[in-house]
Amino acid sequence: MSVWQCALLAGIGFAGGVAVGSGFVAFITVLDIVPRLAQLSKTPYRIHAYEYAIVAGAVTATWMDLRGWSFDGPIWLTAVVGLLAGCFIGLLAAALTEVINVLPILAKRLALQDALLYLLMAMAMGKVAGSLFQWLMFHL
């Protein structure tokens, strides 16, 4: 492979990384996750720490993925990390749902205003069941 081909591939990879990173930042910004977390936890003075934690987590996870690192810890630690990751994904999904108002529109169109709590619980239990199925069937 020539120097120009390597430079072209590096440029394409860098441009792709910038595009994905920009999309991630726009997504987090539109969902207003960091200020909402600061508001709910009553810690607005730590908003910069939350932002640094998101950036540090993204950079660390990217570096670990690129280097092919893995961590073999005890099962209880894996469960704690999985629980925290699940909480984050749930928070992200809830924020996205709140922003685009999917559930009220769905409940109104399907005439399920009285059963909105059951609809939410069914969605949550479906996520849990699907995650458990995937984890138990493919990872054990």
Image (cartoon, rainbow, N blue to C red):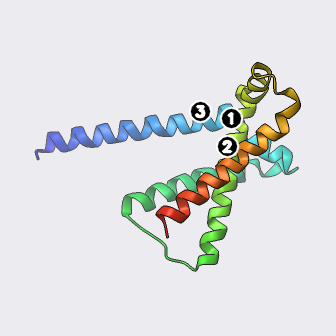
The nearer-to-camera label among 3 and 2 is 2
Q: Give neighbour class at mark 2: few <14, some 14-19, many 20+ (Cα, 10 Å).
A: some
Q: Is 80 on the left-hand or right-hand side of 15?
A: right
First reached walking from the N terminus: tag 3 or tag 1: 3
The residue sitting at the bottom extreme is 74
Identify the secondary structure beneath mark 3.
Answer: helix
Spot occupied by residue 15 in the image (x, y as percentages of width and height)? 37, 36
The residue sitting at the left extreme is 2
Q: Which residue is mark 1?
A: 96
| Residue type highlighted by circle 1 | Leu
| Figure quadrant of residue 107 | top right
Q: Give neighbour class at mark 1: few <14, some 14-19, many 20+ (Cα, 10 Å).
A: some
Marks 3/2: CA–CA distance: 13 Å
Spot occupied by residue 109 in the image (x, y as percentages of width and height)? 75, 19
Q: Which residue is mark 3?
A: 26
Marks 1/2: CA–CA distance: 6 Å
Spot occupied by residue 51 in the image (x, y as percentages of width and height)? 67, 48
Q: Are marks 3 and 2 in contact (CB under 8 Å)?
A: no
Q: Is 41 on the left-hand or right-hand side of 51?
A: right
| Residue type highlighted by circle 3 | Ala
Q: Which residue is found at the position 72% from the left and 38% from the top?
A: 95
Q: Which residue is found at the position 44% from the left and 34% from the top?
A: 19
Q: Which residue is found at the position 49% from the left and 76% from the top?
A: 72
Spot occupied by residue 85 in the image (x, y as percentages of width and height)? 63, 57
Q: Which residue is mark 2?
A: 92
Q: Are marks 1 and 2 in contact (CB under 8 Å)?
A: yes
Q: Are marks 3 and 1 in contact (CB under 8 Å)?
A: no
